[in-house]
Image: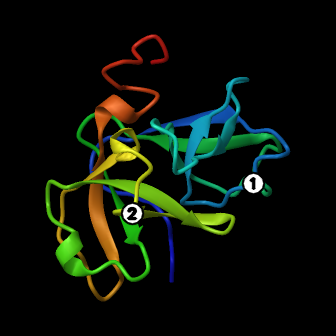
Amino acid sequence: MALGFVLGRGCWDIRQFNTNSAATFLKGSLVELNGARDVIEYASASSSVLGVAMQDSANSTPPGKVNVGIPTPGCTAYADVAPGMVASAISVGEALGVGKRGNYMSFVTSHSASIFSRIVTIVGALDSTTSRVEVTFNQSFVEVFSNSSQSLA
């Protein structure tokens, strides 16, 4: 069963953000901020990520708010692997991108729009029974706690 991203090791920062009515994503999806500073679903062509949605946007409590797990330096997450991706394509230390299926789920993929959209690095072995792998977020490509976004922290 696909779970998207699940918080792993490290000290994750949990914060609540506004979401707009047009943003539709489910728990476990990667999210980013739009120009109005509202949470929206991460687009695979983007080059930065805010964190992991801790709840569905449509069923958020209170309405219009969503809790987001924000990775601090050294945090890891467990992520689904893209369908059809072979184990030999997943090596510890490899930077990969993130994609989605329909309006649900984020998963690790070797197909990224550019080097700047390779936002995760593999830090654990592939679990072939669940098709999940442990990743860390590249700190240059996150919106909070990154090398380039100290003003947002």
Q: Nearer the viewer, residue 72 or 46?
A: 46
Q: How many marks?
A: 2
Q: Nearer the viewer, residue 100 or 127?
A: 100
| Kind of residue indicated by mark 1 | Thr
Image spot of residue 129 (x, y percent): 31, 89
Image spot of residue 14 (x, y percent): 50, 39
Which residue is rendered at x = 44% and y = 49% of the image? 113
Q: Is residue 93 above or below residue 65?
A: below
Which residue is rendered at x = 50% and y = 66% of the image? 4
- Determine the secondary structure under disc 1: loop
Write down the residue under mark 1. 24
Q: Is residue 152 left or right of residue 31?
A: left
Disc 1 or 2, which lies upstream in sequence?
Answer: 1
Q: Contact, CB < 8 Å: mark 1 with mark 2?
A: no
Which residue is rendered at x = 75% and y = 54% of the image? 24
Which disc, if any, is residue 114? none
Residue depth check, mark 1 versus mark 2: number of the one nearer the observer: 2
Q: Is residue 67 above or below residue 139?
A: below
Residue 78, quarter of picture: bottom left
Q: Is residue 107 above or below residue 65?
A: below
Q: Is residue 142 left or right of residue 99?
A: left
Task: Give the residue at the far top of this rendering.
Answer: 151
| Kind of residue indicated by mark 2 | Val
Image spot of residue 68 (x, y percent): 56, 43
Which residue is rendered at x = 34% and y = 78% of the image? 85
Which disc, if any, is residue 108? 2
Instruction: Judge the density around disc 1: few (<14), some (14-19), many (≥20) Cα neighbours within 10 Å.
Output: some
Q: Is residue 16 above or below residue 149?
A: below
